[in-house]
Amino acid sequence: MSRRGLLIILSSPSGAGKSTLAKRLRQWDDTLRFSVSATTRLPRAGETDGKDYYFVSQDEFAGMVARGDMLEHAQVFGNAYGSPRGPVQAAIESGRDVLFDIDWQGAQQINNSSLADNVLSIFILPPSLTELHRRLVSRGQDTAEVIAGRMQKSIEEIRHWAEYDYVLVNDDLDRTSQDLITIISAERLRRQRQPHLVELTRTLEQQFGELT
């Protein structure tokens, strides 16, 4: 293994462009994999167990939480969602990066887990609340009441910006995409993420001794 994998957390208020940026990251590097969440909700049409979600019962989910098998979990609209630890740990130990699309609460839980040393957290800010509201309205998917609720939740999300390793303002999608790529590329090269360097430097010391 040339390096240890990263847990890349992307968080943002709804409408800040996080999903589009995550898609661009995967186009840049197709080895990036989304963490597949477990959920207690029923599958929707076209969803596949193990690909879109791990669909489990309430009892199964509660058991996973009790055993410490969830990196993070939350209740959303009456259903439980969480990130199983096993597949994520296996990925990073084999040098593969895992992408998380979660909120600040999930990010806090992962940062408090045993895998915290592998976390790279990035928060995406909108350039303004006016622009954020415009983006939500332009989707044409939600009622005015739902949009108002999303705006309120956005403020709650934004208040946690300082808890992240990097913060980007998405006022230009191309530039923000490139900034994300730059951040991930640099983090992959950190000394502590490259365990092979220990053996390499020992070999160089040995070679020096043989030459002198």
Image (cartoon, rainbow, N blue to C red):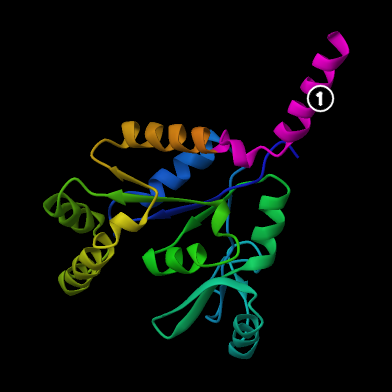
- Residue 163 in picture, x, y percent from top left: 35, 58
Indicate the quadrant where residue 160 lies. bottom left
Residue 57 sits in quarter:
bottom right
Quadrant in the picture for residue 47 = bottom right
Task: Work out whether residue 6 or residue 128 is closer to the camera in this orientation and state it.
Answer: 6
Query: Does the magenta segment cover residue 65?
Result: no
Pinpoint residue 177: horizontal percent, then vertical percent: 39, 36
Q: Is residue 86 left or right of residue 170?
A: right
**Residue density around tag 1, few if under 14, some if 14–19, many if 20 or more, within 10 Å:** few
Q: Residue tagged by mark 1?
A: 203
Residues shaded magenta: 188-212
Q: Is residue 197 magenta?
A: yes
Quarter of the figure that contains the N terminus: top right
Viewer-proximal residue among 190 and 30: 190
Vertically, is 39 above or below 188?
below
Which residue lies most toward the bottom here? 59
What is the x, y in percent for residue 101? 45, 58
| Residue 192 in the figure: left or right of residue 157 | right
Q: Amino acid at mark 1?
A: Thr
Residue 199, how many percent across, how many down? 78, 33
Return the residue nearer the eye: 138 or 210: 210
The relative height of residue 205 versus residue 122 in the rendered view (above or below) is above
